[in-house]
Amino acid sequence: MIDMTGLAARPSQTWGAVRLVPLVREDPVTDLRLDLRAYGDELSEVSLPDRSHYIAYVPHAFVASWTTDGTPAATYGTQLGSPERHVALRFRRRMARRLDKNRLRFLPLHLALEGFLALHFGGPEIAWQEWSHRAVTHGLSPRAEEAYTGAAIRGLDDALRVFEIHPGQCGMVLYTGDALAGAFVVPHPDDYRALHPTLVKDMYGEQVYHYALYHRANPMEAAIDDALVSSLAGLREQAARREREWAEFHDDIMAAGMIASPARIDEVYRLGRFRLRRFLPAFEPRRENHIGEMIVDDGGRLAYLKTFRLSEAQIRRGHLLTLLAAHDWSLPGTAAALGDAEAALGVRLARAGLGHLLRPDLLAAYRKALR
């Protein structure tokens, strides 16, 4: 689970289909700060440790700066000295790369998406006769997934421009048509104010895009019974109570799927007393599944979070790949676990976009058997 302790949801703001729920901290994280490193509009190719390459539109990177003695860290660009120039490069080294002793550059959301794309990337570990030569020799390479930029999400640009930023706001949870699109949390309110505009360039899933087109945010109003109010102090108490009820409803109902999503967590980098991690879900069909990355301290307190909601098609692919890997890529064994026929599993793989892993003649035979 994602530990949201220390973050409190404030009343949401809506614009058409877009709902933004501000997250505020009473006690900001001061010894870790984030700042922006802007890139150009060209595609970026990132070299990975296993000698594979990740190609995507990467509009910006985040640079984390931290201290090791608990003293406040300064946002990069506010320190005394000569500022670095930002140079847009097409080729980038690593998803997370150390720039200095206490500075780390990482690619937000791409770090998480690369973990999803690498899921069982090596392909069949046993050369069963059902798999194509390409699947056995090259695995799932090349593997591609689609996402939309925030500029393509209807109403998001306008919403981010007109929504109020609360005092102490360190993050937000974004909904379209009241479907959770993603969450963004940073250590300090000053970081959020600086990074708030980057949300329009972030990646969002297919479901988020369609919900913004065809749905609207439902009205959620908190009513106060005037019979219970006889003074300003009583009105203040009732208003505070409604705020607490809304925060509990948001965390326990609206954001529950995202908070409970992490099923596999991998540590990517150590930043003093902090840890940069990314996570994958359990790939449960017909439920919310989010991938993401986070920075937590030694006590598990959340300093940074960015999530991406997977589409139903992406969940199906993750679910099938996880089942295949759990059964040593044996089609009969996986089909038995699903309670299905081997031919039905083969056609199911093809419908999920994984048909190229099977021998073409065998896939044709599976389709014929089902007809």
Image: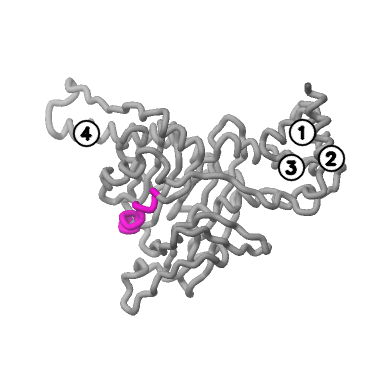
**Residue 122 vs residue 135, the one in the foreground:** 135
Residue at the image point whose x is 33% and y is 73% from the top:
79
| Quadrant holding the C terminus | top right
**Residue 341 vs residue 221, the one in the foreground:** 341
Proximity of marks 4 and 3: CB atoms separated by less than 8 Å: no
Mark 4–mark 1 distance (CA, rounded to whole Å): 60 Å
| Residue type, numbered disc 1 | Gly
Q: Is residue 274 magenta?
A: no
- Which element type, helix, strand or loop, lies under badge 3? helix
Mark 1–mark 3 distance (CA, rounded to whole Å): 11 Å
- Which element type, helix, strand or loop, lies under badge 4? helix
Pinpoint residue 195: horizontal percent, then vertical percent: 36, 55
Proximity of marks 1 and 3: CB atoms separated by less than 8 Å: no
Residue at the image point whose x is 71% and y is 35% from the top:
350
Q: Which residue is mark 3?
A: 356
**Residue 236 vs residue 52, the one in the foreground:** 52
Proximity of marks 2 and 1: CB atoms separated by less than 8 Å: yes
Q: Which residue is mark 1?
A: 346
Label 3 crowding class (10 Å Cα cut-off): few <14, some 14-19, many 20+? Answer: some
Q: Which residue is mark 4?
A: 237
The stretch in magenta equals 189-200
- Which element type, helix, strand or loop, lies under badge 1? helix
